[in-house]
Amino acid sequence: MNITFLALLDSFVSFFRDEVFSNIDTSELAGKNVRDILKSYFEENPISQPDPGGSGYNFIPEGIANLQNTLANLSFGDSLVASAPILLLAASVVIIMGVLGEAFFKKTGIPDVLFLMVLGIIIGPVLGIIQPEAVLQIVPYFAAVALIIIMFDGGLNLHIGKVLKTAHFAVVLVIVGFTVSVGIVAVFAHYGLGWDWIASILLGSIVGGSSSIIVFGLVKKIHISDDAKSMLSFESALTDIFAVIIAFVLFEAALSGEFSLDLLGVTIGKAVAVGLILGLGVGIPWMFVISKLKNAQHSYMLTIGMVFMLFFLATSFGESGALTALVFGIMLGKKNYFTRVLKVKFPEDVIDDSLHSQVTFLVRAFSLFL
């Protein structure tokens, strides 16, 4: 993540803090969660010990008091996160819930996404094991890693023939679905919250699109046609890419006070060009490099390192890196096709499917949890 992107992120945060949320009084809520509220309340209103000779114990207040005392001891002093053993316990719960959620989904059809999101709410805002301030510090970095891995995984599993067959449907779905979602959010923000139109549409572009992290995971498990899977996967990838581009253009417009369709078109064209050039330009040579490596069992980790490098180069040229990772994944996913075309024999384990599936599972589980 280069200096330009960090500066843009800082300006983005400053804009929303100074221009959008400046009229909201959050002094009473700053740094608060259920753990802190419970602790303060019971310090001011201690629960007396029940009388053993009375009619019975009041188990509900006693249970609340015990819960409060337990939660109050989870963190080290004023630390934003709990102790290392508690964090490892939380991580183990996330992994176990992710695995059980997938098994539950196969049996019932209820997405495991719900379990992981609810678990994140419980561990974060409810129990306060991880404070929101701590999450905000790591989310930009983890989000970048999640975007890279998920888009790369999506590219590996996309079938080019079926994508081309359903591309026009995917594009229509992107335009209609994304436009309607952004419009609903923007109207609510403008008339309900009193925001100006640029800020309202900016919010809509951020939250209005389908998430490839969720869609890529779901299409592998649901029983629909391969054409539908390819269309939905391609649509979610395009939505993520265009959401980032449009959000960037609107952010620039919010800072300058002017919006230009020409700038939007140029930005989209530049992002597509950079993504295709880097993905194709590095993807084909990289397959040659992998084919010459004797220690092919480590080629997967080398490939992941190259994806990270491509992400850095893409962001340096003004592209989000999502399209680059997607195209690079498509190149490696179509290894058999390029073996015939380029007359080069590639090693069978260029991509270690077992290791890749585990890495993708971890990234997806923790991204939904956060």
Image (cartoon, rainbow, N blue to C red):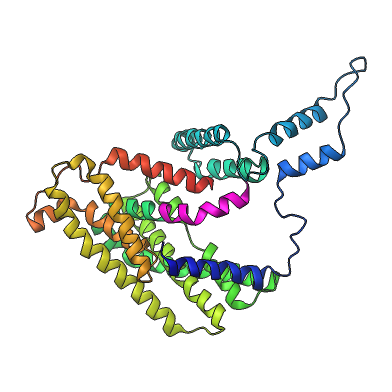
In the rendered picture of this protein, how many numbered marks are placed on residues? Answer: 0
Look at the image and tell me whether residue 221 can be seen: no
The relative height of residue 252 versus residue 74 in the rendered view (above or below) is below
What stretch of residues is rendered in magenta? 131-146
Whether residue 221 sits left or right of residue 104 in the image: it is left
The relative height of residue 281 versus residue 361 in the rendered view (above or below) is below
Look at the image and tell me whether residue 47 can be seen: yes
Pinpoint residue 165: horizontal percent, then vertical percent.
27, 62
Q: Given the current orientation, which residue lies at the most extreme left position?
A: 343
Q: Is the magenta stretch mostly helix, strand or loop?
A: helix
Residue nearest the viewer, comparing 216 with 306: 306
Pinpoint residue 298: horizontal percent, then vertical percent.
23, 42
Whether residue 281 sits left or right of residue 56 in the image: it is left
Residue nearest the viewer, comparing 103 with 7: 7
Q: Which residue is drawn at 51% across and 41% down?
A: 110
The relative height of residue 38 versus residue 64 in the rendered view (above or below) is below
Q: Given the current orientation, which residue lies at the most extreme top position?
A: 53
Quarter assignment of residue 351: top left
Quarter assignment of residue 323: bottom left
Pinpoint residue 171: horizontal percent, then vertical percent.
38, 68
Q: Which residue is drawn at 42% across and 85% down?
A: 262
Q: Does the magenta stretch include residue 71?
A: no
Q: Given the current orientation, which residue lies at the most extreme front position?
A: 77
Pinpoint residue 13: horizontal percent, then vertical percent.
58, 66
Q: Does the magenta stretch include residue 144?
A: yes
Image quarter where the N terminus lies is bottom left
Residue nearest the viewer, comparing 285 with 161: 285
